[in-house]
Image (tube, rainbow, N blue to C red):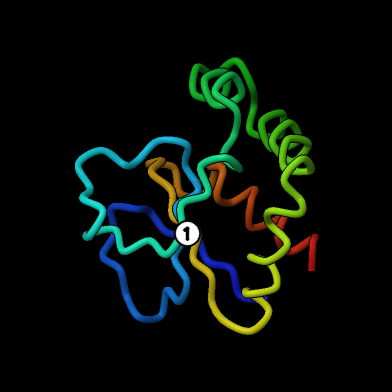
Amino acid sequence: MTVETKRAYEEPSKSDGYRVLVDRMWPRGVAKDELKADEWLKDVAPSDELRKDFHAGDLSWDEFRRAYLMELKEHRETLRPLAKRADSSTVTLLFSSKDEEHNNAVVLRQYLQMLD
C-alpha cells in the first residue's frame, strides 16, 4: 500500500498519483486548478470540535489521534475504495497544516493502512 501525505501548498507532481484533499476547508489562496486534487473528502476530516480543540492546545497529539481514529470508523465504507486504490497505485493525502508530522492526513494514512 502506498499512501503519501503532502501539504496542499506544495507543487503537484506525477509521482503523487491520485491526489485527495482531506481537510474540511479548502486551502487558503490555492485555486482549484492549482491544487489538482482528484477528490475532496471533506466529510472524513476531523469534526470541527476536534480540530479546534487540537489547534487550541486542549488536546495532545495522542488524544487527537485516538479521537480522530474513532471518528474515522464512521467512514469505513467511504474510505475502503481509497485503501483499495492505494494497493495498486500511489495515493497522496493533501492537507493544509504547517505541521507535517502532526495533522489529520497522518492519522488518516494510518487508518487506511489498517483497512488494508
Q: Number of marks in the image?
A: 1
Query: Horizontal and vertical percent for residue 95?
Result: 43, 48
From the viewer's side, name the closer residue of 111 and 21: 21
Task: Specify the farthest residue to the bottom.
Answer: 88
37 relative to 41 in the view: left or right: left
Quadrant of image for the C terminus: bottom right
67 relative to 13 in the view: left or right: right
Name above or below for residue 11 compared with residue 41: below
Q: Quadrant of the rendered structure where residue 62 is?
A: top right
Name above or below for residue 33 compared with residue 56: below
70 relative to 41 in the view: left or right: right
Q: Quadrant of the rendered structure where residue 80 is?
A: bottom right
Query: Horizontal and vertical percent for residue 107?
Result: 64, 48
Name above or below for residue 56 compared with residue 68: above
Q: Residues within 10 Å of mark 1 (few under 14, many from 20)?
A: many
Which residue is located at x 49 percent, y 66 percent? 92
Which residue is located at x 47 percent, y 71 percent? 18
Which residue is located at x 73 percent, y 31 percent? 67
Name above or below for residue 8 compared with residue 65: below
Q: Name the residue under label 1.
A: 20
From the viewer's side, name the closer residue of 82 and 93: 82
Q: What element carries label 1?
A: strand
Quadrant of image for the N terminus: bottom right
Q: Quadrant of the rendered structure where residue 90 is?
A: bottom right
Query: Horizontal and vertical percent for residue 65?
Result: 69, 37
- Amino acid type, mark 1: Val
Which residue is located at x 63 percent, y 65 percent? 82
Query: Horizontal and vertical percent for residue 3?
Result: 59, 68
